[in-house]
Amino acid sequence: MQTMEYLYEETTVYAILFIVAFFASLIDSIAGGGGLLTTPSMLLVGMPPLNVLATNKFQSCFGTFTSTYNYYKNGLLVEKKKFLYFTLSFAGSSVGTLLVSRISNETLESIIPILLISAAVFFITNKGPRGVARNERLLIVFNLVVFAIGFYDGFFGPGTGSFFVLAFIIIKGANIMQSTAITKLLNLSSNFAAFLIFAFQGYVIWYLGLTMAVAQIAGAYTGSKFAIKNGEKVVRPVLVVVSILLSLRILLG
């Protein structure tokens, strides 16, 4: 069982990350992007990047499973090709995780803030999912898009849910609720694939992950019951501000 030295007292770290995990899961179950809160928060308490990514994937599995179950129970998981997309997301995430695990912690410490800020810019410039007409010409590349987003989730992760939602709405013409439902299933797939590889390599901080997992379940249950349209209007600006501030904190040391 791997131990970890934090910048703050361990009890304080666990309490803070428990709260962060709850709100991150609540946000993620509504609009995606919960990793924009958990990833920088875990970095700020002194965890090495690979341990952050590994433990984040582990605890996120519990939140995405809870959200997926709630959407399925309410009849929203209706995508006919969900098993194909599940497999593509799993495969993409596996490749991304194998790649990121070969990169040094020093390199990741330089890359992650840039990725966080890029994701925040995406949330600022994008007004959120809106129903658009299906573009049949793009359907042929949709499988590749699912694989690519899965790859991104395995390599880094934050914002994956929103990318999936946008892909289903823009390319497949699905509505918001159905897109959110299938997104949670695919996010569960990519999270689980990454977790398996990281766990095999010994990067998961199990006690912390299980503590955050409890909060993830509670947050995902609460968030997935909340109206997605109303919730996103409140969550998005807060998410952007927190992501930018934490990214600047990392960059400035």
Image (cartoon, grey):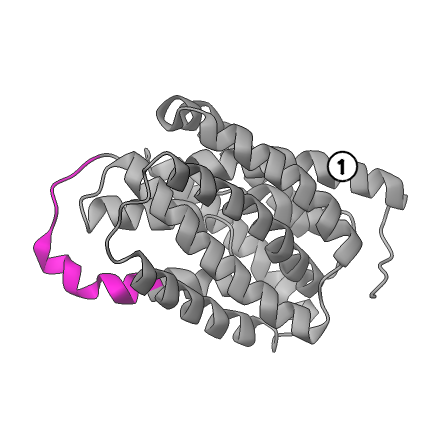
Taking depth in this image into account, of 42 and 75 the one nearest to the observer is: 75
Decide if residue 202 is in sight here.
yes
> Residue 20 appears at what percent x and percent y?
67, 37
Decide if residue 245 is in sight here.
no
Q: Which residues are magenta?
A: 131-146
Quarter assignment of residue 63 = top right
> Residue 197 appears at what percent x and percent y?
60, 72
Residue drawn at x 53%, y 55% is: 114
Q: Which residue reaches farthest right?
A: 9
> Residue 174 appears at what percent x and percent y?
22, 42
Image position of 20 (left or right of 116): right
| Main SS, magenta residues | helix
Quarter assignment of residue 177 = top left
Residue drawn at x 85%, y 38% is: 12
Image position of 189 (left or right of 88): right
19, above or below 10, in the image: above
- For mark 1, what is the residue? 16
Residue drawn at x 27%, y 45% is: 78
Taking depth in this image into account, of 89 and 234 the one nearest to the observer is: 89
Q: How many marks?
A: 1
Q: Residues within 10 Å of mark 1 (few under 14, many from 20)?
A: some
Element class at badge 1 = helix
Residue drawn at x 29%, y 62% is: 145
For badge 1, the amino acid type reads Ile
Q: Which residue reaches farthest left?
A: 136
Whether residue 23 appears in magenta in the rendering, the answer is no
> Residue 249 appears at what percent x and percent y?
68, 44
Work out which quarter of the rendered image holds the N terminus and state it: bottom right
